[in-house]
Image: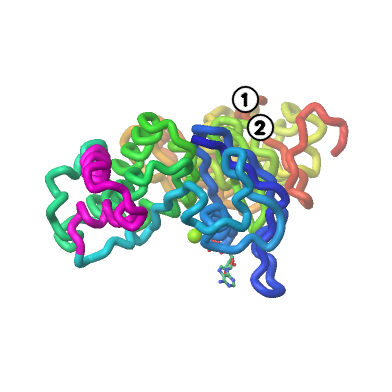
Amino acid sequence: MSGVKLQNVIKKYGDVQVIHRIDLEIADGEFCVFVGPSGCGKSTLLRMVAGLEETTSGAINIGDRDVTVLDPSERGVAMVFQTYALYPHMTVFNNMAFGLKQAKTPPKEIDRRVREAAEVLQITDYLDRSPRNLSGGQRQRVAIGRAIVRDPEVFLFDEPLSNLDAALRVQTRLEIARLHERLKSTMIYVTHDQVEAMTLADKIVVMRAGRVEQIGSPIDLYRNPSNAFVAQFIGSPKMNFFTQADLAKNGSKSLPAAATGAHIGIRPEHLTGCTEAKALVGGTLDLVEQLGEYALVHLVSASGEAFIVKMEHPPKTAKGETMWFTAQSDALHLFDQSSGLRIEANSSSS
Ligand code: ADP
Ligand code: MG
């Protein structure tokens, strides 16, 4: 097993730069997730680690080896793709064994490894089947099995759940988490889905437009997003942003001085109903989505922006009526309106 280190890594396609000088250290055994909107460079960066894309400049280390210019097969990595990329004319067993056969692994050893991986993934009963006769979830397990048998130093996953239906996505996500617990290998996992990132990762790398926006543990990113982009990307429904214009009559009294001229971010789950006198912000009711355990109350702020409050017991307010809310001071996040950077509440700048 080995960690992965990226130093000053850059990728250009001709004149177009798609990865801008990324530095990143992934510890041995860590589950690292690259997350960000479509087109931000997640797959490109992962494929650079795999050796499927050339690195324009910078260095990539796996363990203590510089692998920057090595072929994929020499890097000790195994990759699982969104489209399972199985050979349709081969049985599940032969799909899983293919790489080992090519590497001239002794047949007995191949048999042992394939059966062991199949056991872990609960696909032993399907070993003689053709992939054609498997469900999407089973095919993806075969693809993961094909990676496991190679006993790689690092597992690379590129949106492996995207082709599965919602229920299977949740189940397979859990299986990948268990797999990591069991194998304790270094894993890098790419997704655009912040829920997958939050639930799987030890370390999340939030990317946007070829740059790293923030690196941290899931709870770090949730509690201390370092900019407005991360604040709204992590957490669902996303963090509400208010301005001075949205504050209730007494609202500014409870805010730190630094809030003046800033975006005031408050998560839907941190707003609580209160009287107008105690309110920080108010809004007119637009719509209530009742989800049983809680409801998502959609409102429109004084400045005309939509915001959401998560409530266990939504009041029977009519559409268009005003509702008032407050939040604990530690649930307030302040961001500079132009740079988007986090402002510490006790800082003196405005
Ligand atoms: P993600 O996986 O985050 O959705 P990608 O890594 O696939 O994003 O793509 C990042 C950017 O690189 C995109 O703007 C994409 O258009 C561009 N890109 C990817 N592959 C190529 C290529 N072969 N030639 C030119 N541009 C590319
Ligand atoms: Mg991608």
Q: Quadrant of the C terminus?
A: top right
Q: Position of residue 1 (x, y in %)?
A: 49, 35
The crowd level at tag 2 (other Cα within 10 Å; few <14, some 14-19, many 20+) is: some
The crowd level at tag 1 (other Cα within 10 Å; few <14, some 14-19, many 20+) is: few
Q: Is residue 150 magenta?
A: no
Q: Residue furthest right?
A: 348
- Closest to the observer, 323 or 109: 109
Which quadrant holds residue 84?
bottom left
Three-letter code, disc 1: Gln
Three-letter code, disc 2: Leu
Magenta stretch prevailing secondary structure = helix
Can residue 285 be seen at all in this image of the molecule?
no
For the point 65% across and 58% down, the residue is 210
Which range is magenta?
90-118
Q: How is the image coloured?
A: rainbow
Q: Is residue 175 left or right of residue 128?
A: right
Q: Position of residue 107 (x, y in %)?
A: 23, 48
Can residue 267 be seen at all in this image of the molecule?
yes
Q: Position of residue 275 (x, y in %)?
A: 58, 28
Q: Quadrant of ligand 1?
A: bottom right
Q: What's the CA distance linking mark 2 and mark 1?
A: 7 Å
Q: Which residue position is annotated with label 1?
A: 328
Q: Which residue position is annotated with label 2?
A: 332
